[in-house]
Amino acid sequence: MKIYLDESGNLGGLGANASDDDPYFVLAVLIVRDELSVKRCIRKIRKNKIKKKYKKMSELKFSNSDDNIRRRVLGCIGKTDNDVAFAILRKGQVNESLQDKPQIVYNYICKQLLSKIIGKYAKSGPVELIVDKSLYGIQRDNFNDYVEGRIGQQISTEIEVTHVDSRQCLCVQAVDFLAGAIGRKYRYEDGRYYAKIEHSITIRLDLFEPKNSMI
C-alpha cells in the first residue's frame, strides 16, 4: 500500500500557548489505489487555461492557488478511486508537559493516524509512506526510525518512509490540497473545498474532541 502525507498549520503555540488565530494542526493522508488518476488531476489543471503566474510556478499549492484552481484540483481528486484520512489536533488541549516538545507531539499524531490507516487497509503490510522532505519539525532520521521502527513494530507492519521534493511529486502536491481544504474547514468554518473530498474521507481522527482528555 502506498500513502502520501502532508500537513496544514504548524505546531507552534501548544497547550496554554495556543493562539485563537491558529488553534488547529492537520495531518492529511492520501491512500492510493489509482496513483495515475491523481497525477492526471494536477497535470490537467496546469495544461488547461489558468493564469500565467501559475504556469510559471514550480508546483501548485493550496496556499498560493486561487478559488478556481482549488475547486478544480479537489473536485478532480474527489472523483478518483482513492481515499483520504486525516488527523486534526486541537492545539490548546496539548498537555503542559509537551508544550515545548513539538516533535513528540508530531510523532504521536503520526502514530495514531497511521495505526488507524494500517488497521483498516494493510494489516499485513508492507506500507510505503511518502512525505514532503520539508515537512514541519521532521528530523529525518529520527522520524524514519520512529515510523519504520517503533510504529511498524507495534503494529507488526513493515513501513518504509520516503522523503521527496514536492516540486517533483504530483501526489504530494495533491495531498497538500487535501490538507489545505481540511484545515480551512476547521480554522475558518469554510467547508466549500472540504465538500469536494468529503465522500472520499474514510478516517477522521480528532485529537481531541472538545473537552476530552489531552495527550
Image (spheres, helix red, strand yellow):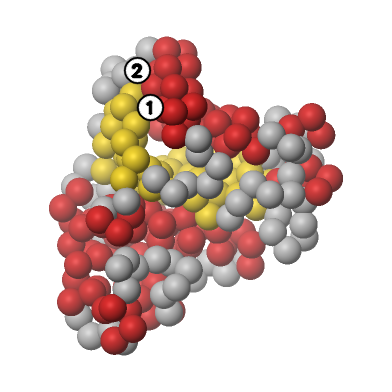
Residue where numbered disc 2 is placed: 157
Residue type highlighted by circle 1: Ile
Q: Height in image: 95 above or below 77? A: above
Q: Is residue 141 left or right of residue 190?
A: left
Q: Is residue 115 left or right of residue 33?
A: right
Percent across and percent down for residue 93 are 76, 41
- Residue 106 visible in the snapshot: yes
Residue at 43% x, 79% y is: 67
Q: Earlier in the sequence, mark 1 or mark 2?
A: 1
Mark 2 Cα-neighbour bin, 10 Å: few <14, some 14–19, many ≥20: many
Q: Nearer the viewer, residue 187 or 210?
A: 187
Percent across and percent down for residue 187 are 64, 62
Q: Nearest to the eye among marks 1 and 2: give it.
A: 2
Mark 1 Cα-neighbour bin, 10 Å: few <14, some 14–19, many ≥20: some
Q: Height in image: 163 above or below 115? A: below
Residue at 78% x, 33% y is: 95
Quadrant including the N terminus: top left
Q: Secondary structure at mark 1?
A: helix
Q: Secondary structure at mark 2?
A: loop
Residue type highlighted by circle 2: Thr
Q: Height in image: 2 above or below 62? A: above
Percent across and percent down for residue 128 are 29, 32
Q: Nearer the viewer, residue 16 or 133?
A: 133
Residue where numbered disc 1 is placed: 118
Q: Nearer the viewer, residue 206 or 179?
A: 179
Residue at 74% x, 49% y is: 13
Residue at 79% x, 29% y is: 97
Percent across and percent down for residue 63 are 48, 68
- Residue 3 lies in quadrant: top left
**Mark 1 and 2 residues: CB-CB less than 8 Å, in contact?**
yes
Could you say which disc has been placed on residue 63 in the image?
none
Q: What whole-number distance in Å separates the C-alpha atoms at marks 1 and 2?
A: 8 Å
